[in-house]
Image: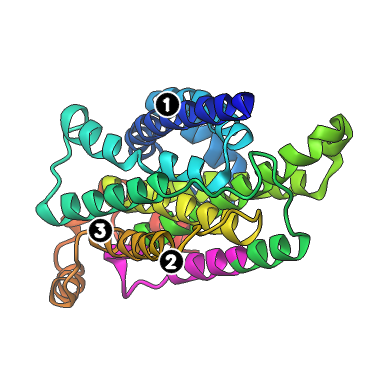
Amino acid sequence: MTNVSLAVGVGLICALLSALGTNFAFLLKHKGALAAPDVDMRHPLRSAIDLFRSKWWSVGWGVAAVAFALHVAALTLAPISIGQAVLAGGLVFLAVLAERFFGFELGRRQWLGISLVAISLALLTLTGGGGGGGAHSGYSLAGMIVFEGIAVCIGLLLVLCHLIERIPGQRGVLLGIAAGLGFGISDVAIKALSGDLEGGPGGLLSPWSVVIVTAAVFSFYASARSLQIGDGVAVIAVTSVAANLSTIVAGLAVFGDRLGDDALVVGVRLAAFALILVGAALIPAPVRAGDTLEQSALEPEAPTATPARHRIPEAEGSPQTAARLQ
């Protein structure tokens, strides 16, 4: 019992360090993504090369790799719902780092949203003593398939929705949520694979290995593009909330983590889940319909307001422009 408690404690420390590293890496990658050409899924290899040519993206990726190793250790050593609650608490690190070192200015609405999420995650952690049998609890195969299938469908729907130009102010947020779900899908598969590997390295041939790689690749591109088209803090925050909330739910629905041992604990945890959703909704800055219509009306008359990366330097009737449009 002592060894189990020690392993869980080490797992939670790994989760805390991973949360700090992950958010620092996200901010570095945001800086690098803005300096890189637009991500184009029609040319995935070229887009990846362009991203890694950006110094800050490469540095952020290195930091993220270390954070991911700590993340895997946390998933392996601690019950998934508790570990993910601590990981999601990194939103506090995000707010402090963004304002202190990256020049972001968070409004009251964003601070309120981040505070609500942090408090709710603390409640989940403090009431999360009812894991479903330890770090390597078995999982329901049917529950796993249903959970992953629903998460994939929602993620794809969000990707399609972000293409709708009527909601330009929130497109980055929608894509960030999709990326977060992809990270969550990968995390849940990693947790399942870590249990399968107890029987030997042959567990690497599990179908979950394919799920991990596919979800990771999807999240790589979706996250990079969301950082390019959305507000940095809002996109990073909703990505983190989507990833961590989905894995907390998976811990309860797939791995048998208990929601609580009595009615009071169950009520507190359900209220915490609700507050997380409310806080996450407050983090993105509101976009007024009037502003969007005004911007659309001004676009033809004010082409200089278009960001440099989207601007076509040639004259409208030049042969180069005609070739691009074709």
Circle 3: element type: loop
Give the vertical position of 161 relative to 229 (above or below). Answer: below
- Residue 221 seen anywhere in this rendered image of the structure: yes
Mark 3 touches mark 2? (CB < 8 Å): no
Considering the numbered disc 2 on the image, is that residue within a helix, a strand or a loop?
A: helix
Q: How many marks?
A: 3
Q: Which residue position is annotated with label 1?
A: 17
Residue that label 3 marks: 284
Please state the horizontal and vertical placement of residue 217, each as a whole percent of the image: 61, 45
Question: Where residue 127 sits: x, y (%)?
Answer: 41, 49
88, above or below 281, in the image: above
Q: Residues within 10 Å of mark 2 (few under 14, many from 20)?
A: few
Q: Give the residues in magenta.
A: 151-171
Rendered location of residue 59, percent (x, y): 43, 22
Q: CA distance from mark 3 to mark 1?
A: 25 Å
Q: Residue at x 35, y 41 (%)?
A: 89
Marks 2/1: CA–CA distance: 33 Å
- 90 and 326: which is toward the camera: 90
Name which residue lies at 76% across and 43% down.
209
Could you tell which of marks 3 and 1 lies nearer the N-terminus? 1
Where 92 falls versus 21 (above or below)? below
> Looking at the image, do the residues carrying marks 2 and 1 touch, with CB atoms under 8 Å apart?
no
Which sits in the foreground, 253 or 187?
A: 253
Tell whether 151 sits left or right of 163. right
Q: Which residue is mark 2?
A: 263
